Image (tube, grey):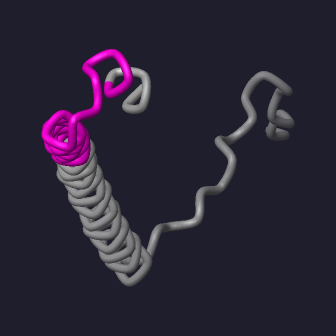
Amino acid sequence: MPSKPPSVNMLPPPPTAPVSTKKRKDDKEWLEIERVRLEIKRRKEERLAKEAQVNYRILVAKAQEAELALKVARAKARQELLNAGISLGEVEHILL
């Protein structure tokens, strides 16, 4: 009895290349390296953000210190001018 040719609907599944254990191990190692790299990057970004916040607070404190120093310098100059006999109106005009 002659055998029937396989029908078109009965195609065998495409051959799949077996994944070697070495490739799987390499993939796992690559994933672990990538995970560690991303963790290092995340920590670096967090550190840089914290440093930026600290630097901002330092700059704000320096600006406040400079404003206070200006007020003190104006008060001293005002008092010296008044002690020198200059009228209050002239002193206010000078210090504007």
Magenta stretch: includes residue 18: no
Residue 4, image quadrant: top right
**Residue depicted at x 27% and y 43%:** 63
Residue 48, image quadrant: bottom left
Is residue 44 visible from the viewing direction of this image?
yes
Is residue 53 visible from the viewing direction of this image?
no
x and y percentages locating residue 67 in the rendered image: 24, 38
**Residue depicted at x 21% and y 59%:** 47
x and y percentages locating residue 91 in the rendered image: 32, 27
Q: Nearer the viewer, residue 51 or 36?
A: 51
Magenta part, dominant SS: helix
x and y percentages locating residue 24 in the rendered image: 37, 71
- What quarter of the picture does the N terminus occupy? top right
- What quarter of the picture does the C terminus occupy? top left
Q: Nearer the viewer, residue 85 or 35?
A: 85
Q: Nearer the viewer, residue 45 or 59?
A: 59
x and y percentages locating residue 5 in the rendered image: 86, 36
As drawn, 80 above or below 47? above
Magenta stretch: includes residue 79: yes
Left or right for 31, reference 50: right
Report the span colored magenta: 64-91
